[in-house]
Image: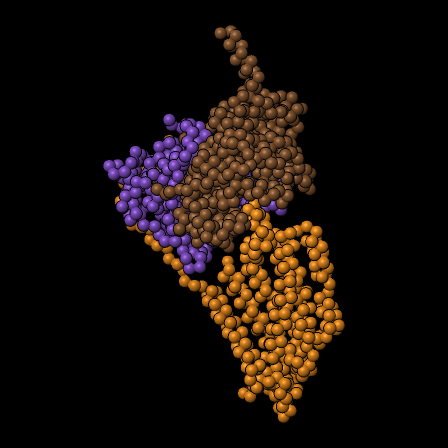
Amino acid sequence: MRTTSLPEKTPSGMGPVDGEAFVTIRGMEVQFRGPKGTVHAVDGIDLDIRKGSVLALVGESGSGKSTIAKALVGLVARSGGTVSVGGVEQAPERRNRPRQSRAALQMVFQNPVSSLNPYQKVATIVAEPLRVAKVPADSRVKRVRELLGAVGLDVDSILDKRPGEISGGQAQRVSIARALAAAPELLIADESVSALDVSVQATVLNVLRRLSVEGGLSMLFISHDLGVVRTVSDDIAVLHLGQLCEVGPSEAVLAAPAHPYTAALRAAVPEPGIPLGEAKHTDAEPPSPLSPPSGCSFRERCLYATAVCAELRPALTELGGGRRVACHHPLIPAAHDTAHEAHAKENSA
Amino acid sequence: MPQITSALATGTTAPPTSPAPALKRRSRTTGERLQTVLFIASLGWLALLLVLMFVSMATPWLDPFQQDFGATKQAPGFAHPFGTDANGRDVLARTVAGAQNSFTVAAITLVVGAVTGSVIGIVCGYFRGWFDSVVGLALDTLMAFPALMLIILLVSFRGPSLWTIGGAIGLLMIPSFARVTRSITLSVRSREYVQAAVLIDTPTPRILLTAVLPAVAPVLVAYAFTAVTVGIVAEGSMSFLGYGLAAPAPSWGGIIAEGRTALAQAPWITLAPAATLTITVLAINVIGERFKEKRK
Amino acid sequence: MSLALTAPAIPVHAVPAVSVQELSLGFESNGKMTHVLEGVSFELAQGECLAIVGESGSGKSVLGRTILGVGSQPNSEHSQGAVLLSGDDQLTASAQERRSRAGTRVAMIYQDPMTSLNPTVRIWKQVIESISNRRRLSRREGRAKAVEMLRAVGVPDPERRIDAYPHEFSGGMMQRVGIAAAIAGNPDVLIADEPTTALDVTVQRKVLDLLDRIRRDSGMSMILITHDLGLLTGRADRTMVLYAGRVLEIGPTERITTAPAHPYTQRLLAAIPNVSGTLRRELPALDGGLPPLDRPRTGCPFASRCEIAMPQCHTERPPAVQLAPDHIAHCWAAADPAEGTAP
């Protein structure tokens, strides 16, 4: 059994206690101007990430999930909206943010090997954030060993290897160790297990889950894979063409989707030994981000769309239990309805 | 279930088989042997030139200026392996001395062209913005300028020295080096490990040193081999036209030009330096190719 | 529960569409040999769909390309064994013969249609390429055939779309075009190499349903190469599990995906994060990695990572154990139920 020493819980000089919103995104918009027109990659998103918990962003291509991550971190400048981390508002571009804010948000990318400098050894790669923070050399060595152990790697054998000499699963864990070296408050995992084999994926997911549960690290987990999302996340936000479809605790949302798109995604997931049921979406082609449909972006493939769906973009409404949905015909009636029903039941009992 | 006629499907446990027979490696092909021979020959040739150059500089033998009017235009023989020219100077000695000058010019070309061009290319590629656009325009202008005329102008103004010629040719090479290094820098810049370095606030010079430079270096070295050969041929051409080193300083192009008038009677005066130049350029190319192959 | 198939009844002694016999393949570079496939044997009956499942390093893509017969590097490739297409060996055939078979007797659908289609050539020319390579088609004939093929794969408005270029299509549509190009030459065997990996999950299902329909309507045999065990149910008749170039298990898809015999298959299934069923926060991970590929394997390639490995697993190649009429596992534990945890 390997002994794992997890990174110390970072002093949360920035504010809220566990369970409260740590990262707040309101009305985020990101637009890209191209030769074919303007693409609204992110079109008015409200999100909260609670301290010490994992929020998953789920969507297919064109959903804007990766763009949200990049805008959060400041690698891409947002066109509108606000982002607060620990109560402190963040400038759109990374270079305009104070150093402490920059270090607080770290990211792990999709491709394990190209995320690491092929010309450096693992020890140097993981030590880099410590070097930037001017940590003295002997403390650096000790810390690097701690971090590599915390992500479950065999420290002595991996220190001197180069990225080309290690496997995808090992490389991804090195990336996580490097991100942890910067002592972040929020870790963003952008499709971090999508390029890994299933058997290796499990190891990395276990590491991420442990970091959150035992280490108290807040996490934003971006993926298209519902199974992975279910295992690793506490809350889930479903995105379609830059718009939020629904938000809520992962188990509740996946067990009983409120938005037709969530239901369609859920029904489309292939699982071993289970024959696929009927598709929960029409045969229409997915819309292109360059020409989004009016009103609700999912209406062309939705089984329940009506005229109002084309005219009016649905707003996020409360469903109770921490769930919200943006739909004119949600599969679960809105909170005020259930409250009304409960009240009526009480009175008639 | 569809009927499966496979032999594997019927019958019971097959007896355990020994490990599959090992696949054999094939022997080296003729092409590979030839390449190795060429490579060794090229190394040998350049080594020989270096030795001769050293001898010429350090010892009284192989003096390019020594004139022997009793033995003008002598055919190649034991005393003068490349023969003598109209002034009785040993053509071999002159050719070797010409090599010194050619290599010096090539080195200057590299310093001016490769180093300057690479720095410009890396800076433009990494930082982009207005600097990139302005410099790009300047380089395009330089490339549009007729090369020959530029060198002639510069040499006419400043006089024919090694530095002027080397500098002029190097200047003309800056755009191509800048272009190559810029495109590599652009592709490296978009890689995730550079984005990761930005995220952890690695200072930019360190990113350039540890991420960009190692990616640029191999291509730069490979391209440098080509640049050297271009420099040598360019110098030869300039000297041939009379815009190179002034007589009696020996240079390959100059000697070739001198031998032009005597081609009928003493062809070796022109042929010896011409052949030497050609073989030297070929040798450098072969070594450069090998370097590129080994890098893959 | 047996799956109802509507494929035409196949005579017992029909020649298998594909028969691979003790195939071993290695690539040489810089004096080092990488063993990619070792002793692979299996058969594909006419009209059936076989899934080849494996992770990275399993050799599944190389196997697909070898059956196809084109796209290999003859100088560095060394092979042994036989790869028979309806009785004709691909390994001993000349490059010209293999080229003529590709498109007409066996065809491939690639993972990324974006890179397998030529961006500078109009769609209709690429769709009919396997036919136009063999005989002259007039422009009218070619275009009509292209329209027919696009209609068959469900591309809307085919008369207009045949003049489009690849980049004008979405991912799912492009894959349909790729399928049209593959079946245009009416091949006997269709190889689909990770056909839906690059597609969104809502589009994935449509493409797989299309392949299924084509196979059943035309009687084509199909090989589905994938790493995703979830795609197989209801689509592949049999499944073969490949690991480090060796076949570990082969049998009816239903058994392989619900009650596999080989420890690797069992671990693989257990590691898949499930959307239905009980929530598991900690997944059973697989330690270690592939055995070194630069030397021929002794024993079972999975032995170094197997929980129930016995001493002989490391030294002696496991036998092919017949567990059911068409379910075979290459495993010592399956051979001797007393020692291992075989079913």
Q: How is the image coloured?
A: by chain
- Determine which quarter of the picture holds residue A34: top right
Q: Between residues C324 and A336, which one lies in front from this camera angle?
A: A336
Q: Colour of chain C?
A: purple
What letter labels the chain drawn in brown? Answer: A
Q: Quadrant of the N terminus of chain C?
A: top left
Q: Is residue C19 visible?
A: no
- In screen coordinates, is B113 left or right of C111? right
Task: Tell me if residue B70 comes above or below residue C238 in the rendering.
Answer: below
Q: Quadrant of the C terminus of chain C?
A: top left
Residue lying furthest bottom: B70
Residue lying furthest left: C338
Which residue appears at 56% of the width and 69% of the height? B284
x%, y% of residue A214? 44, 36
- Determine which quarter of the picture holds residue B7: top left
Which residue appears at 44% of the width and 57% of the height? C29
- Determine which quarter of the picture holds residue A240: top right
Task: Tell me if residue B221 comes above or below residue B5 in the rendering.
Answer: below
What letter labels the chain drawn in orange? Answer: B
x%, y% of residue B119? 63, 59
Q: Between residues C119 and A223, which one lies in front from this camera angle?
A: A223
x%, y% of residue B21? 33, 53
Which residue appears at 25% of the width and 38% of the height? C339
Which residue appears at 52% of the width and 64% of the height? B291
